[in-house]
Image: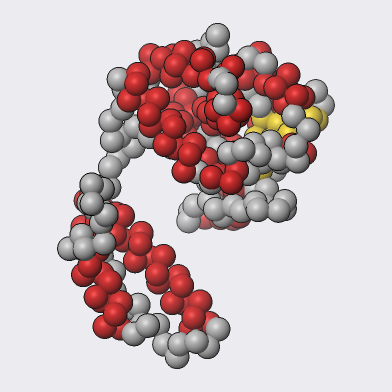
Amino acid sequence: IDKERCKAYKSLLMGHGLVPRGRRKPGPVTIARKLATLHHFVKWLVDNDYLDHDVMSGVKMPPKAVENAKTQKEDFSEDELTRIFKGLGPFRTHREPVLREWYWGMLMLAHSGCRVTEIIQLLRSDVRQEAGIWYLNISDKGEGQRLKNKASKRLVPIHSNLLKAGFLDWYAQSKDVRLFPLLFPYGAVKTTQTFSRLLKKLGIKRKELTLHCFRHTLTIKLAKARTYPPLQNRLLGHAIGKSVEERTYMAGLNLSVKELSEALEMVKFPTIT
């Protein structure tokens, strides 16, 4: 690996020379992500003395081109959420066990605002109860569990709408160590692709709406419910900001499961039938 080959790799990506026949050509955001992946590997080679310097330094996409190419994600409207919940219905008793798991994974994402990987990597032991309140323990302590950042480690109450839908009954049926043993090996891929197909079937698929928009939706719902930003950050696992207030005064803010649950319950969702 040398500088010229890294530049050649970038040229191939930009010229779409690595795109399989029939596949969509990558845009600036995708190319930047692929280059970043290679850069991480090169940094590892340098740290472990396989290379004497960072040959990927400077080999990247122009930041402005990447920023302009990004699609601004939207939140789901109340009508779209209702249609999604209704569209999920048949998967609850689907003949394929992996899709029955997927059904509950989707509802958990919609009601928690968690990231996809945070949900599908959960262990059964991460579903807990404290003072009569059921919650998820989002952590990286278990095998195969990883978090995006330090703030991602948190407790997320399980919304009453999900409990009324029968989540605990489904939870009690499985004896596997993992909560989603069939989805976990696929990572986020199968979960995301199946959801995209559902949106297309429902006629609400567009580039601004993806699975990650469940997270956007809950963020906006929490804001409309007039919950405090520090509380929103603790629920969603956002990294602490750069202001003095966030870094110094709010860094040590600890909220109980009861306090988090009271805030989350201020958000209303369509009934799951």
Residue at 23%, 47% in the rendered image: 22
In the image, residue 16 lies at what x, y percent? 20, 60
In the image, residue 261 lies at what x, y percent? 67, 26
Residue at 70%, 22% in the rendered image: 170
Q: Which residue appears farthest toward the bottom when viewing the image?
A: 52
Q: Is residue 140 above or below residue 135?
A: below
Of residues 118 and 149, which is closer to you in this image? 118
The answer, for residue 87, to whether it is visible in the render is: yes
Q: Quadrant of the N terminus?
A: bottom left
Determine the image quadrant of residue 7. bottom left
Residue at 61%, 53% in the rendered image: 146
Q: How many marks?
A: 0
In the image, residue 48 lies at what x, y percent? 55, 83
In the image, residue 212 lies at what x, y percent? 43, 37
Residue at 21%, 63% in the rendered image: 17
Q: Is residue 251 above or below residue 112?
A: below
Of residues 81 and 35, which is closer to you in this image? 35
| Horizontal side, residue 97 vs residue 26: left or right | right
Q: Which residue appears farthest toward the left when viewing the image?
A: 15
Of residues 165 and 215, which is closer to you in this image? 165
Determine the image quadrant of residue 159. top right
Determine the image quadrant of residue 37. bottom left
| Horizontal side, residue 141 vs residue 229: left or right | right
Of residues 171 and 146, which is closer to you in this image? 171
Tell me the colour scheme of the image: secondary structure
The answer, for residue 256, to whether it is visible in the render is: no
Q: Quadrant of the C terminus?
A: top right
